[in-house]
Image (spheres, rainbow, N blue to C red):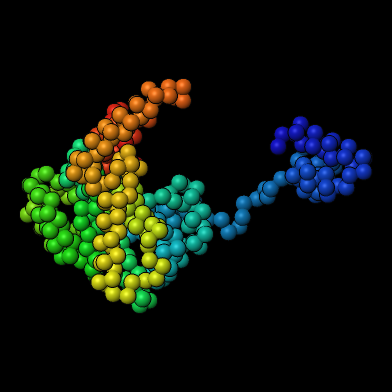
Amino acid sequence: MSLDARNEAVKLISEAQSSGTRLNAACRVMDIGVRTFERWLSDPAGDSRRGPVTEPANKLSPAERDHLLTIANSAKYRDKSPSQIVPLLADLGEYVASESTFYRVLKAESLMAHRSKSSPRKHARPPEIKALRPNELWSWDITYLPTRVSGLYFYLYFVVDIYSRKIVGFAVKEQQTSDHAADMISKICEIEGITRGQLKLHSDNGKPMKGATMLATLQGLGVIPSFSRPHTSDDNSFSESLFRTLKYCPQYPSKPFATIEEANEWVTDFVQWYNEEQLHSAIKFVTPGSRHRGEDDAILANRRTIYLKAKAKKPERWSGEPRNWNKPLEVFLNRLKATHASGTKLAA
C-alpha cells in the first residue's frame, strides 16, 4: 500500500473512532489489523521497520551452494526431487544441505522444473478425422456393469458408428481381453460388410485396444486403428457420451446383474431402444438406425414440407424462417478449433 493510501486509511479510521465506532470494527471494515493501524498512527512518515542487517550464520557459502547445484543437476540426480536426493546422499555417507535448503536454492535458480536434458514426453493431439457416411469411422470402448458379488464386474464392449450414432455391435464378457475385442470387431465387420481400407476404428489406450491379437486382427481386416492420448477421455468423447446415456437412462436396472445372461439380455434391449426408438439430438432427432440406413433423408424432407405448409397457412405466427431440418453431412472426431470453417459439427 502506498504512503498516501495508508495515511488516508488512518484518517478514515480515526474519524470513525471520533464518531463512536469501535477500533476493531473500523479496522475490520478497512481490512487491516489493529496493531497495523497503531503502527501507522505512530509512524506517519513511513514504515521504519527493517529486516536483519547481517547474514545468517548458517547460510551456505558460495562454494557450498555451487556444490549443491552441481549435485542436483548431475546425471544421477537431475530427474529426482530434493526429497529423494537428500536420503540418497545420506545413504552414501554425505550430507550437503537439508531438503528445504535444496528446494530454496533450486527455486532461486529456476530449477524446480525438469532438470534433465530430455523433456517430459508430450502426447500430440490425435489428428482430426471426418466421417461423411456410415461405416467410415467407428469408436469403441469398455465399461463396467455391476454384479451382485461385491468387487466383481461384467465388461460391456460397445462399438458406435460416429456418423450415424448407431451402436453397430456389443459384447458382454467376464474379462477385458484383446482376444474378446478382436473377436467382436471381426463379427461386426462381417455383418456390416466392411471392406479393406474402408474403416477407421478409434479407441483409447487400454490393453484390450492395443493388444497384439487386436492389432493383428485389425491389420488382417484392413481396418485403420486410431488412438486417444493417454488419460484424455475427450479424445474418445463419442463412446464416453454413449456410456453416460446407458447408465443414466430411465430403464437402467436399480439392482446389479445376477448373471451374465441377464446383463446381455438387458443390453440387447437397450441397443434396440437406442438404435430404433430414441431420437438423437445430434442428428436432427432421427433414430441412429434410420440415419445408418439412409432413411433420414425422407424423414427430414417430410419435416421440412410440414413446416413450410404450416408457415404458408399461418404466416403471422412465424417471425423468421422455419426450423432447420437439413441433414448434417459431416461429423468430426477430434476436430481442431482452428479448422472450423464449414460443415456441421455434431456434439458427442
Query: Residue 45 placed where, x, y %?
Result: 80, 35
Query: Residue 311 placed where, x, y %?
Result: 39, 25
State which quadrant residue 67 falls in.
Answer: bottom left
Residue at 82% over, 38% down = 10
State which quadrant residue 147 falls in.
Answer: bottom left
Is residue 16 at all visible to an observer of this figure?
Answer: yes
Query: How many numbered callouts?
Result: 0
Residue at 88% over, 37% down = 15
Residue 56 shown left or right of residue 40 in the figure? left
Q: Quadrant of the C terminus?
A: top left
Residue 122 drawn above or below residue 180:
above
Name the one closer to the observer, 57 or 81: 81
Is residue 320 at all visible to an observer of this figure?
Answer: no
Residue at 26% over, 66% down = 265
State which quadrant residue 172 falls in.
Answer: bottom left
Residue 241 drawn above or below residue 157:
above
- Residue placed furthest toward the bottom: 149
Q: Quadrant of the N terminus?
A: top right
Name the one closer to the observer, 5 or 256: 256
Query: Residue 315 placed where, x, y %?
Result: 43, 22
Name the one closer to the observer, 133 or 28: 133
Residue 312 drawn above or below residue 48:
above
Residue at 32% over, 49% down = 278
Query: Residue 232 placed where, x, y %?
Result: 33, 51
